[in-house]
Amino acid sequence: MKHALQLRQTQRLQLNAQLTQSLKILQLGRAEIDLEIRAALDANPFLEENSAANALDVAFDAQALAESDSSRVERTSQGDERLGETPSQHATHEETRWDEGPYSRRVDSDFDFSSEPDQSMWADPGNVLRQRLLSELALHRLNETDNLIANALIESLDEKGYLTASHPEICAILANHLRPTDEEIDAVLHLIQSIAVPGIGARDLRECLLLQLERLDLSTPGLSAATKIIDKHMSLLASHAYPALMEKTGEEKSGLAKAISLIQSLDPKPGEQISPKPTEVIIPDVIVRNVENNWVVQLTRRDGHRVRVNESYRDYLKAPDAETRQYIRDHMREAHGFVRSLEQRDQTILRVAEAIVAIQQDFMTSGDHGLTPLTLREVSETLDIHESTVSRAVDKKNLLTPLGVYPFKHFFSSGLGNRSGVRVSARAAQARIRKVIESEPVDRPISDGALAQILGAEGIPIARRTVAKYRDQMNIPPAAQRRGLR
């Protein structure tokens, strides 16, 4: 084989350090960019915080959040009227039934705070539960043996309040101190179950619900039937076998309905009443407002203005020491590059948000029903930037709208064609499916095939299997599992 030298001209894309840093910073979320800025300030002596810009951004954040929180109820009420709903249809944490949780209506508010403001957001919920139980048990003046058993039992409770250890495991835990009998363990366990919130200390769901029923007044409507159902016929209740339940309990339809309503009012996770999980607060990156019938998009914080380069160090570039000059030159270059990357991040996020709002204006007034099919490619072509840049810009970013806070990715969805050739967003189809299910008769739930026919009659051709897929994505059970009693 003969060897030869050849000259060949090719083109290739090579990322320099500045571009690499800009792409990395663009993809960071709100919390991550804070850490990145703090790390840069610590590592580079030529960067400093711009206190004036930070004060303006904090004031802007407070104003934006306050306006959103004060007007959220009014806007939600107006939105309900537009969609033919009532405000009562919006489920809150307290109103959600335990067996309806997977498909209760989502409230798009991320500015709700814990009901216990003095509880640290980093506190261990299980530890809060244990401390509460131990403090109440201290009032009973237990002897040393019962006190050791009580501590072992309480330490074996999970965050929901369930006992996760069996009697032999409790004995193994206490092996170095004593060997309690099953009767002694049961006696202390019954004491724990009788204090605090009903249902705590149960070993399974059945016992948890029975403990709560035992605390109710004997005159409570449906109590006897509810106790019989939970004690012996939970499998029939889970499968919605109401005729079989009426036969087993001897109740008429109205009596069974009262019993099931009572069961639905019980709490399957009583431990969370004492130690609720801290609410995650999401601070939006962009806010959109209606100003004189025009949607105006603004950044809630301009990260590019939070830091600045201390130019006073430029005087040291004339230092006689070459190593000092090189150190200053390199760090000044890094500082300027970092600030430039932050500014580019702000501009790109704002441009992408403006493009999204321009396309999804109907969403701002109608919610998911007004979503337009949208892809990353369409935004990239509109802004004349690469699709991967749009992907980084929408990742972990949130938009504050009149209807609540939504991630940027919520506004991107595939489309379904209708008879007139107009594409309908898949999210809009999901919203319509949810709306139909929410208004269905309790005793006659609508099947997936019927849902497909309803949407088809409204100009949204959709297959039954697609309805089933969307329903599963929204955590809505099949029609057979949604059937109830009037």
Image (cartoon, rainbow, N blue to C red):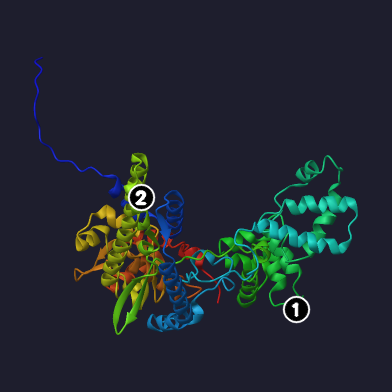
Crowd band around label 1 with a 10 angstrom C-alpha radius: few (<14), some (14–19), many (20+): few
Q: Which residue is mark 1?
A: 219
Q: Quadrant of the C terminus?
A: bottom right
Residue found 23% across the figure and 59% down from its top: 380
Q: Residue furthest top?
A: 1
Query: Can see residue 461?
Result: no
Q: Can you say which quadrant of the picture contains the N terminus?
A: top left
- Choose the circle earlier in sequence order: 2 or 1: 1
Q: Identify which residue is drawn at 75% across, 54% down.
A: 154
Occupied quadrant, residue 241: bottom right
**Observer-nearest of 29 and 191:** 29
In the image shown, does 198 or 213 lie closer to the viewer?
Answer: 198
The image position of residue 74, as x and y in percent, is: 45, 84
Q: What secondary structure is found at the residue carrying circle 1?
A: loop
The residue most toward the front is 320
- For residue 128, above or below residue 266: above
Mark 2, secondary structure of its residue: helix
Q: Left or right: where does residue 232 sit relative to residue 299?
A: right
- Identify residue type, mark 2: Tyr
Q: Is residue 383 above or below residue 216?
A: above
Residue at x-position 43% and y-position 67%: 54
Count of labels in the image: 2
Mark 2 — residue?
Answer: 316
Please say whether residue 213 is visible from this viewpoint: yes
For label 2, the crowd category at 10 Å Cα-Cα, with few meaning under 14, some 14 to 19 and many 20 or more, is: few
Residue under the point 28% across and 52% down:
388
Image x and y of residue 352, in percent: 29, 64
- Residue kind at label 1, given as amino acid type: Ser
Please state the horizontal and vertical placement of residue 371, each as a whole percent of the image.
31, 70
Q: CA distance from mark 2 to mark 1?
A: 87 Å
Q: Quarter-wise, where is residue 214 in the image?
A: bottom right
